[in-house]
Image: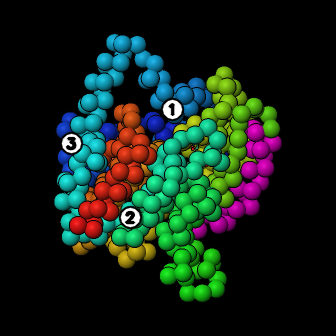
Amino acid sequence: MTKHGAVVVPEDAVVAAAAVGRHFSFPPPRTGGVGGDSCKKLAAQQIDLGAAVIGSWLDSMKASSPRHRLVAPAVAAAAADAEHDEWMEKHPSALGKFEALAAAAKGKRIVVFLDYDGTLSPIVEDPDRAVMTDEMRDAVRGVAARFPTAIVSGRCRDKVLSFVGLEELYYAGSHGMDIQGPTNAAASKGGEEEEESVLCQPAREFLPMIGEAYAALVEKVEGVIPGAKVENNKFCLSVHFRRVDERRWGAVADQVRAVLRGYPRLRLTQGRKVLEVRPAIKWDKGEALRFLLSALGFSAAGDVEDDGDDDDAFPIYIGDDRTDEDAFRVLRARGHGAGILVSRFPKDTCASFSLRDPGEVKDFLRKLVTCAAA
Ligand SMILES: O=P(O)(O)OC[C@H]1O[C@H](O[C@H]2O[C@H](CO)[C@@H](O)[C@H](O)[C@H]2O)[C@H](O)[C@@H](O)[C@@H]1O
């Protein structure tokens, strides 16, 4: 931490590869707790936002999109292919291994957790246009009709609900800091639906501070650096630099750092060409997953001393981003359930399986529905 307490978590910095051996094993070996050897907790790697580390932080920003692999020369491309094959051995396609996954879930109650951006909708330039297709919506609706289903997103809960448009789901917005149950007629008991459906808001006291920081970031970043955009996600803020000239990413870092000096109780993490400002509390997508499992009546196992044997839930979590690793780690610590990373490229991850893109996510969800119907 800096002396002001503002920190950045370089989320691509060491998430050790998920599989313990070279070859895929499922169910995945336990890590011996959330902070186990093979999946190191990123939160433990908070790096000072001081000028001395801005270089490595910028590297991290540059690495937040893997597009450079597309233009690799032939030799590098061959090496990348080999690396990809090896990675796929450790994180095989959840479609290709569907039968193994279904066998592991047999006799258990599947619970589905879905990230939004990059998982249900493709990554696009303008965050306000990241809509999902009707086909994807149908697939999610089908899954939710059979299994408890939650959307877990960095976005503000209302916004992600408006994008997904399905009231029968659970929604965990603001990286899990704003959790709501289903709001459809079957779930609500009439009147005060909004109040009744809110299940958990562990960062409520931060609302005024987040509002202030938002205004400051709009003024000092969005108003100063062309292309920068600050998104208010209620309990956290996103500073987008996807449309900022790469030569000015350092300026984005500097400006955000300057603003956060005034807010020692806020911390910074990184997603896909976005810096995420959030309350410095021990709450993330992994905690949201635990909370929801518990709210659904399942054990929120994951502690070393809990062997999870009496747990009849089989959580499936699908996500594409670094913030989803917190949830993958919880699943790995549980020793059952399946973490599925959405990525075309090898990435360090605690997920057991992979899917290439939202198109494959849709196919996987459809397969899940067909399998449940059978
Ligand atoms: O947890 P998620 O649902 O994956 O949300 C994470 C962030 O997603 C959004 O930003 C990302 O998607 C945008 C649209 O495709 C893209 O333009 C941006 O570069 C990505 O970082 C969202 O806008 C953020 O607020 C979320 O925190």
Question: Which of the two discs, 2 and 3, sits closer to the camera?
Answer: 2
Point out the image quarter for the C terminus.
bottom left
- Given residues 154 and 213, the one toward you in this image is 154
Q: Is mark 2 within 8 Å of ligand 1?
A: no
Q: Position of residue 346 (x, y in %)?
A: 36, 33
Q: Is residue 117 left or right of residue 127?
A: left
Q: Name the residue that disc number 1 marks.
A: 65
Amino acid type at mark 3: Phe
From what the image shows, is residue 38 above or below residue 140? above
Q: Name the residue that disc number 2 marks.
A: 143
Q: Is residue 25 left or right of residue 327?
A: left
The secondary element bearing badge 1 is classed as: loop
Dot 2, crowdedness within 10 Å: few (<14), some or many (≥20)? many
From what the image shows, is residue 108 above or below residue 89? below
Q: Position of residue 292 (x, y in %)?
A: 44, 69
The secondary element bearing badge 3 is classed as: loop
The secondary element bearing badge 2 is classed as: helix
Residue sticking out furthest to the bottom: 190
Q: Which mark is residue 24?
A: 3
Q: Earlier in the sequence, mark 2 or mark 3?
A: 3
Does the magenta run of residues contain 44? no
- Given residues 119 and 48, the one toward you in this image is 119
CA separation in Å, label 2 and label 3? 27 Å
The residue positioned 64% from the left and 86% from the top of the image is 191
Query: Magenta span covers which residues?
Result: 201-222
- Given residues 251 and 338, the one toward you in this image is 338
CA separation in Å, label 1 and label 2? 30 Å
Point out the image quarter for the N terminus.
top right
The residue positioned 36% from the left and 18% from the top of the image is 77
Q: Is residue 336 left or right of residue 232?
A: left
The residue positioned 77% from the left and 54% from the top of the image is 212
